[in-house]
């Protein structure tokens, strides 16, 4: 009477979650810091910001940490960033060009352009 039947339809959400969980996370560590050299101190933060491209396109991002030399940003859309972007975040008083040093799905490391 209460026995499960094998004719039940598979749950598409559960299948998708299993597929996402099965993908191994990329571990990318690119750094311009040579061994033995100390990195700039990073300050954790969670601020809404935007990246502007030379083409005029914009992407909303979240600044996850920031230092004197760069920042880590995360974004919702999985897209390829260009080599150079303009990072704008008014409360941290950041409006500077930056190089995209590394990028994985939904996150990127930026190195501020020295002026």
Image (spheres, rainbow, N blue to C red):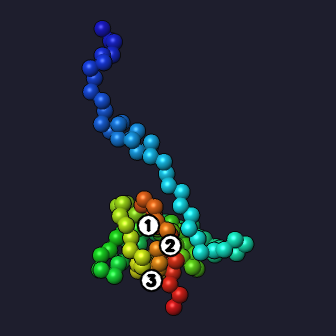
96 to 33, vertically: above or below: below
Under circle 2, the secondary element is: strand
- Which mark is in front, 1 or 2? 2
Q: Residue under circle 2?
A: 101
Task: Name the residue that disc number 3 marks.
Answer: 97
Q: Nearer the viewer, mark 1 or mark 3?
A: 3
Relative side of 92 to 13, left or right: right
Residue 1: image x %, image y %?
A: 30, 8
Residue at point 36%, 36% (across, down):
14
Q: CA distance from mark 3 to mark 2?
A: 13 Å
Residue contact at pointers 1 and 2, CB within 8 angstroms: no
Question: Which residue is labeled 1 in the image?
Answer: 62
Viewed as shown, does residue 62 lie left or right of 58?
right
Provide residue 83's location: percent of width, then percent of height.
42, 76
Q: Quadrant location of residue 78?
A: bottom left
Q: Is residue 74 visible?
A: yes
Q: Residue at x 30, y 29 (%)?
A: 10
Q: Residue at x 46, y 65 (%)?
A: 103
Give me the C-alpha separation between circle 1 and circle 2.
17 Å
Q: Which mark is residue 112?
A: none
């Amino acid at each position: 009477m209460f026995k499960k039947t094998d004719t039940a339809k598979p749950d598409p959400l559960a299948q998708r979650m299993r597929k996402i969980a099965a993908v191994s996370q990329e571990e990318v560590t690119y750094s311009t810091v040579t061994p033995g050299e100390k990195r700039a101190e990073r300050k954790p933060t969670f601020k809404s910001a935007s990246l502007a491209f030379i083409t005029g396109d914009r992407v909303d991002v979240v600044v996850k940490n920031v230092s004197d030399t760069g920042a880590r940003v995360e974004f919702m859309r999985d897209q390829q960033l260009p080599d150079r972007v303009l990072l704008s975040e008014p409360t941290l008083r950041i409006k500077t060009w930056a190089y995209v040093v590394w990028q994985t799905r939904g996150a990127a490391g930026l190195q501020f352009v020295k002026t």
